[in-house]
Image: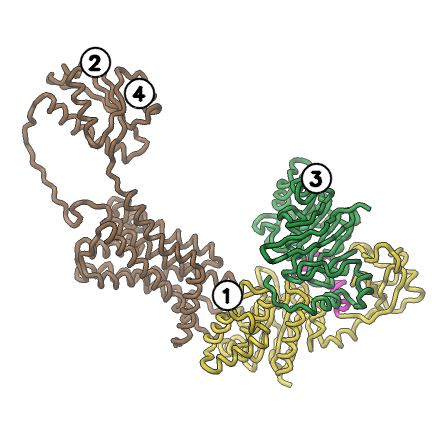
Chain colours: A green, B yellow, C brown
Amino acid sequence: MEYSIRTEHLTKSFGAFTAVDHIDVAVEKGEVFGFLGANGAGKTTAIRMLCGLLAPTSGRGTVAGFDIIAETAKIRTRIGYMSQKFSLYPDLSVAENLRLYGGLYGLGGGELKDRIKEMAGFLGLGDLLPRITGSLPWGWQQRLSLACANLHRPEILFLDEPTGSVDPVSRRNFWDLIHRLSAQGTTIFITSHYMDEVEYCHRLSIMIEGRIAAIGSPRDLKREHGCATIHDLFLRLMERKSDGSPA
Amino acid sequence: MESIVSIRSLAKDHAGEKALRGISLEVPDPCLFGLIGADGAGKSTLMNILATLSDPDSGEVRMLGLDLRKGFPRIRDDIGYMPQRFSLYQDLSVLENLDFFADIFGIRGKAKAERMDHLLEFAGLAPFKGRRAGLLSGGMKQKLALACTLIHHPKLLLLDEPTVGVDPVARRDFWTMLKSLRAQGISLIVSTPYMDEAALCDSLALLHQGAVIAGGSPAEMLAAYPYRLYRVEAAPDARISTLNYPGDKPPPPGFELIYPSGGSLHAAEKPGQAGDPLGRLRLAVPEAASATMLEPALEDCFFALLSGKTANAAGGA
Amino acid sequence: MMSGSRLATIARKEVRHIFRDWQTLVVVLVMPVMMMFLYGYALNADAKEIPVMIEMPSPAPETRQVADKIDASSLFSVRGTVPTASDPRELFRLHGIKALFRFPSGFARDVRRPGGARVQVLVDGSDPNLGTIIRNAAEPMLLGATLEVLGVEQPKVLDLRTLILYNPEQRSALFFVPGLMAVILLMISALLTSVAIAREKELGTMGQLLVSPLRPLEIIVGKIIPYLFLAAVDGFLILAVGRVAFGVRIAGNPWFLGACSLAYIFTALSIGLLISTLAKRQQHAMFMALGATMMPTVLLSGFIFPVASMPLPLRILSHIIPATYFLEIVRGIILKGVGLKELWTPLIVLMGEGLLLMGIAIRKFKVKL
């Protein structure tokens, strides 16, 4: 089995506080993997370690076959990252944002032009290239973020809470794109606390207070715990914990 | 029954586009009223008008027995408004925020202390009253914001997408609070993109491109669902159990709609179809192993109501 | 109708914001002091030890003596003597000198002839101020030195005596303390109020305030009261540092100065409010406030450049900005010790501008978003 992401006892402590506590995660190539948890459960810390932005306190891991401690530079050329919070420059046009991101990953000239054309076609952004990003509806901005993160054809796409206020129809369309990328062999690692949509993942894990509390396919997890939905499962796992942790 | 909000032919342009195209709505008193719709459907524009923060271009709005245009200063005394973005002072503590809103509403002395204690208790924020608002978790921020809008005993609450970006546990707690307010006789108008929240409302209006295209109680909306709905699942031993159906692929023969939901597919069959539905589904979804009849949920209604209208709605506009 | 308690609520909240954001508070309190020391030393334009060289083809004793006199002056420092400079620019470049005195080979002979000796002074004009100082100092110095060397007494035809009033020692502190009062008070008041209101809009809290029973006037007045105090503290700080560190004493009535400063702060707050009605974000408010206050005050109020020597359009502008009138008042009180009798015109203009701007700001303040 070929793994895109693999961690063993990955741990990160900040002083006395253990944000990520011995997590073992293995994500297959081309898989859509949901990485769930409440606010402050340690998702962001874990992602930052996987992207090579933060050194683990102990444990190890590989991303795209490279060590997350020693080979962070190689990892960064092979991953794409998209976040709800920061991604696009609203005062630039769609094409300018795409060119900027392509440039950041060392694409240029005819190659960049071809990739932008291809990506715009794939995501249906073709007519919008000259538009100012900030003037587009949120769903289109989200697609553009996805296009930017995917322009350099990363092996793994990290999507950090990509869906915010999105109605069922736009969310459905977004997930359609995710599955098309997955079908092309891109591994998708996605965090969300919107439980309905994570059922679209091939497999998922639920993180609570730094630990992986459950991992498996949505169907197996629901069967195993006797829950009708992942939403119910999440609530049950969270039950013991009060909503008192800071964001 | 007297309506707490009565809207007639309300229209409003926003940024050169028609944000609201002559909508009419009645919100009974008391009511937990849900405003649902895609991004850009006009939910926030309507909320802003009801909050007396922007003027309609045309049409009439009566709120709390007063005309919105003339009576807005008095309307403001009886409404609580929670905007989409967190709008409290992040550098002030939980207590200081509450204190500030109590003061500007002229609540003083013993009444203020009691009201603040009650609201801290209600929102479950008593243990965190000294914490700066900016350091609260997303869910707690929303609870604090709700507490602040309640400080002056409003008769009507306007909440604009209050649970966006909030985790499921906090979302559930928040809705428990809304239900208990409703039980106390307060009316609420809540906008939300989430259909599981819509199901908790007494009455709903579905906004699409600035118009109300459907409405009624959740039960009425479900009863009006025109299709026969199936859940399509992969075989129990399939390696990948999560099914997907590309959005640009036409639905299988005899079906109006098919879309992923909860890991399986939901397929809406047109009325009057004969023959084995699974057989027809398999033509398009070879991995389909079973098709079970299913009661529609509000999300299925949403797809059914918007499918024809949003052929190009990938962006949700 | 304004409610005192709601006003106090807004003001109290604003004070909390100010103290919570202690970094800004430190900047607001330290900046005036820092600017005073900067201006105190930077504006001290007494040039000293300007590096120069001397070209001297034939070192006769007379030439040497004149050269020594140049070196002995505190203004110049002779970095070297060359017999001939084939390329004078090379010397400027290599030795970093600002002037080259070129004596002719027959200097000792020529000075005794009726036509006199020709001495050339090459001046580095890249710094115009320094160039002017060198030019103005070179001739009397060379003339004096040469006459002294020759032992010739110059016949006295004019006895010029200049008496400087108000600032007899021409101390720059007396000049920049009023100027800084004008700049800092305006900046703090206009910048901080406009940013404070723009912040409410940016955060979305303005909507919450508008939906409440608060009246626009209560929001405005409640928000400006704390900044009025803060600006007053800054004004006091400038005067105190001016007195302690630079020995600037207020010749006139300090209470009158305080009252006039409050009038000026009021005008400045009105500018801030007006800006905040236009700006939607803190960043816009900041740039607009800086553009509307800092630049015109420094450049056009007469703080640095005299108004009288400006071209007409700038002179008109300078008579519009409030700082010009405030500067006139402050200079009058601190330096001349004059009072209301002499200063009522600028004071009335200042207050009139404040009322006008405040009126516009209140009218423009929207009750809706």
Label 3 secondary element: helix
Check residue A114 in the rendering and tell me which mark sits there, or answer none: 3
Q: Is disc 4 surrounded by few (<14), some (14 to 19) or many (20+) residues within 10 Å? A: some
Label 4 secondary element: helix
Farthest residue, direction bottom: B1
Identify the residue under disc 1.
B89
Marks 3 & 2 on one chain: no
Identify the residue under disc 2.
C58
Work out whether residue C313 can be spotted: no
Q: CA distance from mark 2 to mark 1?
A: 81 Å
- Count of number-bearing discs: 4
The chain under label 2 reads: C
Q: Is residue B243 magenta?
A: no
| Quadrant hosting residue C9 | bottom left
The chain under label 3 reads: A
User: Amino acid type of disc 2?
Assistant: Ser
| Quadrant hosting residue A155 | top right
User: Amino acid type of disc 4?
Assistant: Pro
Q: Residue visible at 22% across and 32% down?
A: C75
Q: CA distance from mark 4 to mark 3?
A: 60 Å
Q: CA distance from mark 4 to mark 1?
A: 67 Å
Identify the residue under disc 4.
C88
Residue B264 image point, x, y percent: 82, 61
Q: In this rendering, would A165 be left or right of B109?
A: right
Q: CA distance from mark 3 to mark 2?
A: 77 Å
Start and end of the magenta stretch? B298-317
User: Amino acid type of disc 1?
Assistant: Tyr
